[in-house]
């Protein structure tokens, strides 16, 4: 486990983006000099994805590409997420039809689909955070999309700079 400047413990497998780590005051000798970059792009779905999993793939690649966080290397992780999504929907449908408790020869038992659904949700939340699909994860991520500059802000900033004024943001 690694600790960060705020004193909270963080699993060692989850690193902060470089810019955020530097801004928070991490020691420069602890910052990776040349982090591995994956080429941005929209990967094709794996051939095994079908039905609801494939539908979810198509929704997610549009969303993640618009966010600027999708890379070609994300194909397998996204496929896992989409498979979990379809499994979660199937489990929820089974719960809707049969209920959370099943009556068997042994008596009342918890529907196994409840556990399946809960496990899928837990895993999906982890993957979604890795893609920046929650507010706290987005706060620490950088996009591979260029930042659009507001023409009015650019004009006003240039005008203020020419006059020697400082603009508060």
Image: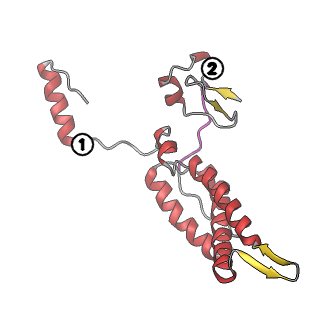
Q: Main secondary structure of the magenta part?
A: loop
**Label 2 SS:** helix
Q: Residues within 10 Å of mark 1 (few under 14, many from 20)?
A: few
- Classify residue 118 by image quadrant: bottom right
Task: Tell me: 100 left or right of 44.
Answer: right
Instruction: Identify whether 135 is placed above or below 108.
Output: above
Extreme residue toward the left, this view: 163
Spatial distance from mark 1 to mark 2, Cα to Cα?
36 Å
**Label 1 SS:** loop
Badge nearest the viewer, 1 or 2: 2
Residue at figure coordinates x 16%, y 35% from the top left: 155
In this rendered view, identify the residue nearer to me: 157 or 24.
24
Quadrant housing the N terminus: top right
Return the x and y of residue 27 as percentages of the image width and height. Answer: 58, 17
Residue indicated by mark 2: 30
Residue at figure coordinates x 50%, y 50% from the top left: 134
Return the x and y of residue 10 as percentages of the image width and height. Answer: 65, 33
In this rendered view, identify the residue nearer to me: 97 or 110.
110
N-terminal label among 1 and 2 = 2
Quadrant housing the C terminus: top left
Residue indicated by mark 1: 150
Task: Tell me: 161 left or right of 44.
Answer: left
In this rendered view, identify the residue nearer to me: 50 or 112.
112
Extreme residue toward the front, this view: 107
Residue at figure coordinates x 66%, y 83% from the top left: 97
- Coloration mode: secondary structure
Instruction: Identify whether 24 is placed above or below 91.
Output: above
Residue 39 lies within the magenta run: yes
- Classify residue 105 by image quadrant: bottom right
Return the x and y of residue 146 as percentages of the image width and height. Answer: 39, 43
Give the residues drawn in magenta, as a range: 32-40
């Amino acid at each position: 486990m690694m600790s960060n400047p705020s004193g909270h413990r963080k699993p060692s497998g989850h690193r902060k983006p470089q810019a955020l780590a530097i801004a928070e005051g991490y020691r420069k000798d602890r910052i990776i000099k040349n982090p591995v970059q994956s080429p941005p792009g929209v990967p094709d779905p794996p051939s095994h994805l079908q039905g609801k999993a494939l539908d979810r793939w198509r929704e997610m690649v549009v969303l993640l590409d618009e966010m600027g966080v999708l890379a070609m290397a994300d194909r397998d992780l996204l496929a896992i997420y989409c498979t979990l999504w379809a499994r979660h929907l199937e489990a929820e449908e089974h719960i809707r039809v049969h209920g959370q408790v099943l009556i068997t020869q042994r008596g009342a038992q918890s529907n196994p689909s409840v556990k399946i659904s809960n496990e899928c949700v837990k895993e999906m939340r982890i993957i979604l955070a890795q893609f920046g699909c929650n507010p706290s994860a987005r706060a620490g991520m950088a996009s591979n999309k260029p930042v659009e500059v507001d023409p009015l802000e650019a004009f006003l900033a240039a005008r203020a700079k020419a006059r020697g004024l400082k603009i508060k943001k």
